[in-house]
Amino acid sequence: MRMRIQKATNSWREHLIGSGQRNSMKIPQKHILVVESDDNSVEMLRLYLGHFMYRVTAADTCGECLQLARIKRVDLYLLGDGCEDGDTFELCRNIRALDSNTPIIFCSADASRADRRQGMSAGAQAYLAKPCELEELRRTIRRLIAGALARGVGAGAA
């Protein structure tokens, strides 16, 4: 009986989300801090991820990201390209110094084997090459946030 109720609840939730009524339900949004200097990329991520109930906060510099990381609890960091004020690998290490558990994804056009190795050794859990499929990005985000929540990590775990 319990499984039938859960199945019906999930079906109803999917129906509401699909019909554009997602805000009427109190489904907590997962919070993603995106570091990306390209405004078009940020807006595309906001629209796409917002459709799947993710709240996106954007920073266009390493300094702004670190400032936000100190004051906001997030469920995931998404590090892009082209920060004018620093190196994103160093940014990743600095985030890890502040927060050793929240997942980090690199999404970068610099996707050589050495770049990937450097990103993972700096503390990221995933490294996607641009241009990446949005569905692949969403699946990676969902998987990493679910794993972090299972471990009691992230804004949603509080």
Image (tube, helix red, strand yellow):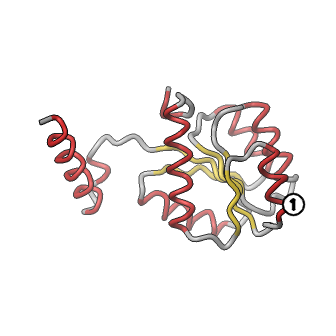
Q: Is 3 situated left or right of 100 in this image?
A: left
> Picture quarter containing residue 70?
top right
Residue 103 x %, y %: 64, 42
Residue 14 x %, y %: 27, 55
Residue located 49% across and 64% down the image: 48
Where does the N terminus fall, quadrant-wise? top left
Q: Is 72 situated left or right of 15 in this image?
A: right
Viewer-closest of 143 and 21: 143
Identify the residue under disc 1.
114
Q: Residue furthest bottom?
A: 131
Residue located 83% across and 50% down the image: 89
Count of labels in the image? 1
Q: Amino acid type of disc 1? A: Ala
Residue located 26% across and 47% down the image: 24
Vertical side of 56 occupied by 71: above or below: above
Residue located 71% across and 56% down the image: 106
Number of residues whose C-alpha sits closer than 10 Å to that of mark 1, classed few (under 14), some (14–19) or many (20 or more): few
Q: Residue furthest left?
A: 1
Viewer-closest of 116 and 103: 116
> Picture quarter containing residue 27?
top left
| Residue 35 at least partly seen | no
